[in-house]
Amino acid sequence: MNKKDLAAEITQFVCRNFLFTDDPGALKPGVSLIESGTMDSTGVLELIAHLEQTYCIEVADEEMLPANLDSVPAIVAFVERKLG
């Protein structure tokens, strides 16, 4: 999966599950999902479960950091690293 498709899929997940819309334009590129109130700690766990199931990766406790999971670009980069 290329970076653009990965970003689109993650954006779609966030929009549907946290913003309750199918409009990807509802999520500003690069916005902090936690600081903007889009996602709380429970949302982070939902996101992690989605990433693990969708991309067949395992997110270790020490990887559950804002640097990896706080914005769509950060999530894309994290998933790409995990997929090798």
Image (tube, rainbow, N blue to C red):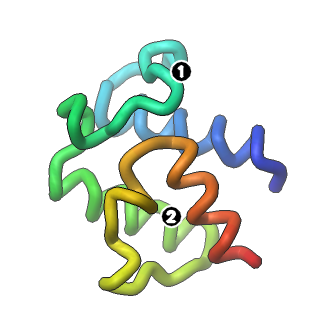
Q: Nearer the viewer, residue 76 or 9?
A: 76
Location of residue 79 by image quarter: bottom right
> What residue is pinned by disc 2?
51
Mark 1 and mark 2 residues within 8 Å of each other at the beta carbon: no
Q: Looking at the image, is 22 positioned above or below residue 47?
A: above
Q: Label 2's element?
A: helix
Q: Residues within 10 Å of mark 2 (few under 14, many from 20)?
A: some
- Outermost front residue: 67
Q: Position of residue 37 (x, y in %)?
A: 18, 33
Which element carries disc 1, helix, strand or loop? helix
Question: Is residue 26 shown above or below 75?
Answer: above
CA–CA distance in space, label 1 to label 2: 18 Å
Q: Residue at x 75, y 42 (%)?
A: 5
Q: Position of residue 36 (x, y in %)?
A: 24, 29
* First in sequence: mark 1 vs mark 2: 1
Rendered residue at 63%/76% (across/down): 82
Q: Quadrant of the N terminus?
A: bottom right
Q: Is residue 79 left or right of residue 66?
A: right
Q: Position of residue 14 (x, y in %)?
A: 42, 38
Q: In the image, what residue type sits under mark 2?
A: Leu
> Which image quarter is the C terminus in?
bottom right
Q: Give the residue displayed 40% in from the left and 85% down from the top.
A: 60
Q: Nearer the viewer, residue 6 or 72?
A: 72
The amino acid sitting under disc 1 is Pro
- Image location (x, y in percent) of residue 73: 57, 44
Q: Give residue 24's mark.
A: 1
Q: Residues within 10 Å of mark 1 (few under 14, many from 20)?
A: some
- Determine the residue positioned at 32% across, 25% down: 20
